[in-house]
Amino acid sequence: MPASNAVSVAPVRERMLSATGFILAVLALLLLAWQWYDSRGSVDALRQELAKKLSDADALNKGSRAIADQAREASTDLQVKLGVLESRVAESQSQQIALEALYQELSRNRDEQALAEIEQSLLIANQQLQLAGNVKAALIALQNADFRLQRMDRPQLTALRKAINRDIERLKALPYVDTVGISVRLDSVIGSVDALPLAMEMRPPLASGSDAPREADSNVWQRFMREAWAEVKQLVRVQNMNQPEVPLLAPPQAFFLRENLKLRLIGARLALLSRDQTSYKADLQAARDWLTKYYDTREKSIGNALSTLRNLHDSDISIEMPDISATVDALRNTRLGRERPVR
C-alpha cells in the first residue's frame, strides 16, 4: 500500500504543478496582454497628445512666422520712415542754418540802420548846437542815442556810449539861457510898438472950467461968445515941455520909425537864437534909445517897454557851446568797422 500510494500521489502532484504552472502562465499571459493593451492605450494617447502638440507647435510656428513677417514689414516701413525723418531733419537743419544766417544778416542790417539813424540825429544835434545854440535839442538827441545803443546791447558799443555820456554831462553843466522866455518878451514888446504914443503926440491937460459962468446964469449970446472964445484958444496952445527938443515927425516918418523899431527888436531876437551877444545888445540898446528919444516916456506903457528892454539887455546869452564832433566821428568809425567784414 505505501508503495502504490506513493506512485499514485506523484502524478497528482505533477498534474497539480502542471495546472499551477499553466494557471501561472495564463495569468502571466493575461498580465502581459493587459500590460500590452494598457501600454498601447498610453501610446495612443501619447501619440494623440504628441500629434496635438505638434499641430499646436505647427500653428504656433505659422503664427510666429506671420508675426515675424509682419515685424519684418514693420521694420522695413520703420526704416523707410526713419530715412524720411532723417532727410527731413537734415532739411530742417539746413533751413535752420539758413534762418540763422538770415537772422544774423537782418540783425546786422538793423543795427547798421539804427547806427545810421543815430549818426544822422547826432549830426543834426551838432549843427543845432553850433549854429543856433540849441542845447536842449542836442541833449535830447544824445539821450535818445544812448537809449537806443543801450537797447542794442552790444559790448563793442561801450566806448561809444561812454563818449555820449561825457557829452551829456558837458551839456548839463552849461548855464541855462531861457531863450524861449526872452523871445516871448521880445515878441510882447514888438506887438505893442504900434500902440506906443510918440512924444510929439503929447497933449496938455484941459483947463478946468470951474470959474466959467454956468449956462443957467447966461443968455444965448453970452454962451455963444464963450464957445467961440474957447474955439479960438484951441488954435494956439502954450505948453511947458520937459524935453524941448521933441522931434516932429511926418506921418510917413512915424510909420517908418515904428517899423524900424520892430526890425531892431526882430534883429535882437535873431541874434538871441544865433547866440550873437554883440548884435543882441546893440539892437536892444538902439531900441531903448529910440524909445527914449521919440516916445512919451511919461506913459506907463513906454516905461514898461524900457524896463523890459533894460532887463533883456542885461541878460547874458553868450555861452561857449561844446563840440560833439568827436562823438559823431566815433560813431562813424564804429559803423565802418561793422561794415568792413560784410564786404
Image (tube, rainbow, N blue to C red):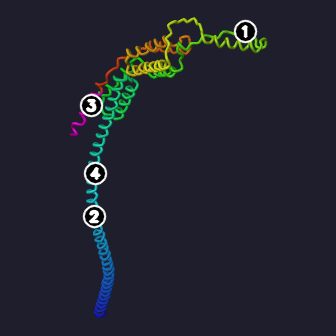
Tell me which label, 4 or 1, sits earlier in the chain: 4
Crowding near pointer 1: few (<14 within 10 Å), some, many (20+)? few
Secondary structure of the residue carrying numbered label 4: helix
- For the residue pair 241 and 146, the one nearer the viewer reads as 241
| Residue at image location 51% in from the left, 21% down from the top | 194
Highlighted range, magenta: 328-343
Secondary structure of the residue carrying numbered label 2: helix
Above or below, 169 relative to 10: above
| Residue at image location 33% in from the left, 20% down from the top | 322
**Numbered disc in front, either 3 or 4:** 3
**Numbered disc in front, either 1 or 2:** 1
State the residue position of label 1.
212
Number of the label disc, if any, that sits on residue 95: 4
- For the residue pair 91 and 295, the one nearer the viewer reads as 295
Can you tell which quarter of the image residue 53 is in? bottom left
Q: In the displayed image of the protein, which residue is found farthest to the front?
A: 221
Tell me which label, 3 or 2, sits earlier in the chain: 2
Q: Identify residue type, mark 1.
A: Ala
Whether the residues at callouts 3 and 2 have beta carbons within 8 Å, the answer is no
State the residue position of label 2.
75
Q: Position of residue 338 (x, y in %)?
A: 25, 35
| Residue at image location 67% in from the left, 11% down from the top | 229
Above or below, 154 relative to 227: below
Number of the label disc, if any, that sits on residue 332: 3
Crowding near pointer 2: few (<14 within 10 Å), some, many (20+)? few
Q: What whole-number distance in Å separates the C-alpha atoms at marks 3 and 4?
A: 35 Å
Point out the image quarter for the C terminus.
top left
Whether the residues at callouts 3 and 4 have beta carbons within 8 Å, the answer is no
Q: Identify residue type, mark 4.
A: Gln
| Residue at image location 29% in from the left, 65% down from the top | 74
Whether the residues at callouts 1 and 2 have beta carbons within 8 Å, the answer is no
